[in-house]
Image: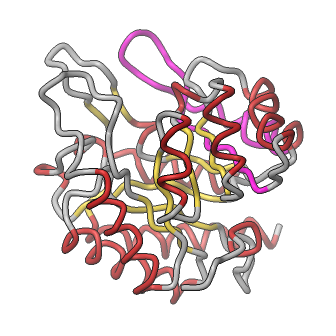
Amino acid sequence: MNQLNVTEYISSSPTGNFFLLAGPCVIEGEEMALDIADKAYRVCEQLGIPYIFKGSYRKANRSRIDSFTGIGDEKALRILAKVRSEFGIPVVTDIHSASEAAMAAEYVDVLQIPAFLCRQTDLLLAAAETGKFVNIKKGQFLSPESMRFAVQKVRDAGNENVAITERGVMFGYGDLIVDYRGIPEMQQTSKCPVILDITHSLQQPNQSAGVTGGKPELIETVAKAGIAVGADGLFIETHQNPSVAKSDGANMLPLEKLPALLRRLTKLKMTVNSL
């Protein structure tokens, strides 16, 4: 696959549809990744949704030391590259330290900065200096207007290809809430696309058993609200069988439900565009 201009790609829908980042929380194997990519790609192509496949090559932020972290960095990154080449679409993965940026950039089109690390200057600069598109998850502890400083770090490194992803703010000790006012505010103050991470916004982190919970029954509600207030893109983690997913299964969307959800959200987006 030739190098894609991700900034142009995410705004390439002929109908003005939102763009989508979707895939499993973590790469568990080649077969599952290709199957998810195939099903998501097919429905996105039908609906005019620019699609970016999402998959973490390694999970560094886990509640317990015995939690699954990955199948091996290089093996997982090669699977991401295979998705990229087979479907001709961009792929996105997280990086956790500055030393990982150049390595991951060899395989993917978008480098994602985890929410807890969104103020780490060395990480932001390393991602920016690869020339790849940088997606910064907004920290659960930050106000919308403060995200402009993280974005500016990327721009100061000479990279204008950047987006912010809203993923909820902490509400007490074990819940998250989305402040939808922050979406237009970040669009205005940071002057970049704003994505709403649907499934992570529905997490219930750090439960007593050391396993994150979630409220997947609210996925459509949160997604519709995001479209209504003008989110440029959506982020959805999906899996063939969330009950056996090795990470974040409690808040994932079952893959079989993705096509119908995207059709309903597309109808809503077209209505919003017509207002």
Quadrant of res 79: bottom left
Q: Position of residue 132 (x, y in %)?
A: 66, 58
Residue at image location 54% in from the left, 58% down from the top: 105
Q: Position of residue 121 (x, y in %)?
A: 69, 27
Quadrant of res 258: bottom left
Residue at image location 63% in from the left, 48% down from the top: 135
Left or right, residue 198 beside residue 128: left
Q: Is residue 165 above or below residue 61?
A: below
Q: Which residues are magenta?
A: 161-187
Q: Is residue 109 above or below residue 57?
A: below
- Is residue 109 a member of the stretch shown in magenta? no
Left or right, residue 175 beside residue 161: left
Instruction: Point out the image quarter for the N terminus.
Output: bottom right
Residue at image location 71% in from the left, 57% down from the top: 131
Q: Position of residue 94 (x, y in %)?
A: 47, 46
Residue at image location 18% in from the left, 13% down from the top: 208
Of 17 and 31, the residue lying toward us: 31
Of 230 and 221, the residue lying toward us: 230
